[in-house]
Amino acid sequence: MSKLITVFGATGNQGGSVIAAILADSELSKEFRIRGITRDTTKKSAQDLVKKGVEVVTADLGSVDSLTDALKGSHTVFLVTNYWETMNAEVEYSQGKNVADVSKAVGVSHLIFSSLHNVTEETNGRLTKVPHFDSKANVEKYIRASGIECSFVLPGYYMSNFTQMLNRSDDGSYQLFYPVGNEAKFPLFDAAQDTGLFVKVALKHAHQLKNKQVLAAAKYYTPQEIVDTFSKVSGKKAVFISVSSEQYKASLPSAIAVEYLENQLFVEDPGYYLGESLEPTLELVDSKPTSWEEFVKKNLSAWK
Ligand SMILES: NC(=O)c1ccc[n+]([C@@H]2O[C@H](COP(=O)([O-])OP(=O)(O)OC[C@H]3O[C@@H](n4cnc5c(N)ncnc54)[C@H](OP(=O)(O)O)[C@@H]3O)[C@@H](O)[C@H]2O)c1
C-alpha cells in the first residue's frame, strides 16, 4: 500500500508546488498518496486539489488537536509556516513546535521542514531583526533536538518578490533599489513552480539527506544581473540603484522596513546561504529549476 505524505500550505506557493510535483512524478505518485492541509476546504484552491485526487483535510497549525487528527497515519510530512500572516516569530515557532511534537507522537517517519538560517546567530548579533529567518531556524533546531527523522529545504529568495521590488517609474523604466552593493548574491527561485522539485530531492534521497539541508535555488544572481536580464526580456530600461540603509528604510512601510533592510544586508554579508555552493543540491534535482530569465518571460504581465 502507498505511504501517506501530508503537505502543509497546500493552498499556497510552497505546499501547492510540492503536491503538483509529487502528482507529476511517475515514481513518487505511486509511492505516496497525498493529504493536503488547509484551514478552509471550501476555498477554490482546496477544491482544485480535491479534483486532482488529493485528500484535503482541515487543520490549524495553532491547534494541537486538529494536527493530531490531520497527521494520523502520515509517513512523511512537509511543513511550511507562514510568518507573514501574523508577523510574530513566537507564533511561527509554536506552530513549528506543534507539528514536530505531534509528528513524533503519531509516529511520522520523515519530517521535511521549510527552514532558513538564523540571522542573529550567523552575524554574531550584528543583525538581530530578521525574525522570519530566526524563528524558522529555531524550529529547525527544535526538530533536530526532538530526534525525529528530518530534513530541511531552505527556499531561496522568491523570484516573485521582484514583481513588487522592481518599481516602474514615470518614464516607464524600472528601478531596483537595494541597500547593498553589486557583489551581493541573491539565490533566486520560483517558489510556486520549483519548491516541489527541491522537496523531491529530500524524498528521493531521504537516507542520504537525513538531518541535512537542501538549498532550493536555481542560481546566485547579482542585482545588476537581475535588472539586465529583466531589461533583455522585457525590452524596458531597468537599473539597479544601490541606496543607503536610511534611504532604503524610508522607501518601505514602517512595519517591515527594518526587517527587510536587515534581510538584504544578510544577503550581502555573510550571504543568504552563508556563501554555500548550490551545486550539491543541483546535482540531485530531476530537472533544471526555472531560471530568472524564464521566470520573467513567463510572468511579464505581472510588471504591466
Ligand atoms: N518571499 C521570499 O523570498 C521567501 C523566501 C524564503 C522563505 N519564505 C517564507 O515562505 C513562507 C510562506 O510560504 P508560501 O509562499 O508558500 O505561503 P503562501 O503562498 O502565502 O501560503 C500560505 C499557506 O500557509 C497556510 N497556513 C497559514 N497559516 C496556517 C495555519 N495557522 N494553519 C494551517 N495552515 C496555515 C495557508 O493555508 P490556508 O490559508 O488555506 O489555511 C497557505 O496554504 C513564509 O514563512 C516566508 O517567510 C519566503
Image (cartoon, rainbow, N blue to C red):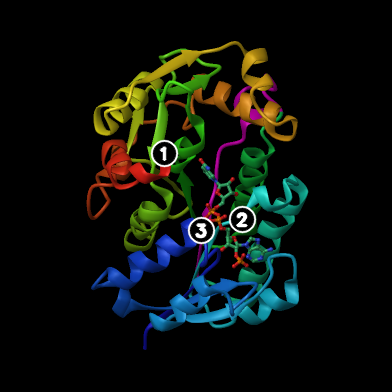
**Label 3 secondary element:** strand
54 relative position to 139: left or right: left
Task: Name the residue type under label 2.
Answer: Thr
Task: Name the residue type under label 3.
Answer: Cys
Which disc, if any, is residue 81?
Answer: 2
Residue 192, compared with residue 303, is above or below; it is: below
304 relative position to 97: left or right: left
Q: Quadrant of residue 159?
A: top left
The residue sitting at 57% across, 72% down in the picture is 37
Which disc, if any, is residue 150?
Answer: 3
Residue 195: give x, y in percent of width and height.
40, 54
Residue 72: give x, y in percent of width and height.
59, 81
Residue 151: give x, y in percent of width and height.
48, 54
267 relative position to 224: left or right: right
Residue 261: give x, y in percent of width and height.
63, 24
Which residue position is annotated with label 1? 303
**Label 2 secondary element:** loop
Q: What range of the chain is rendered magenta?
A: 109-128
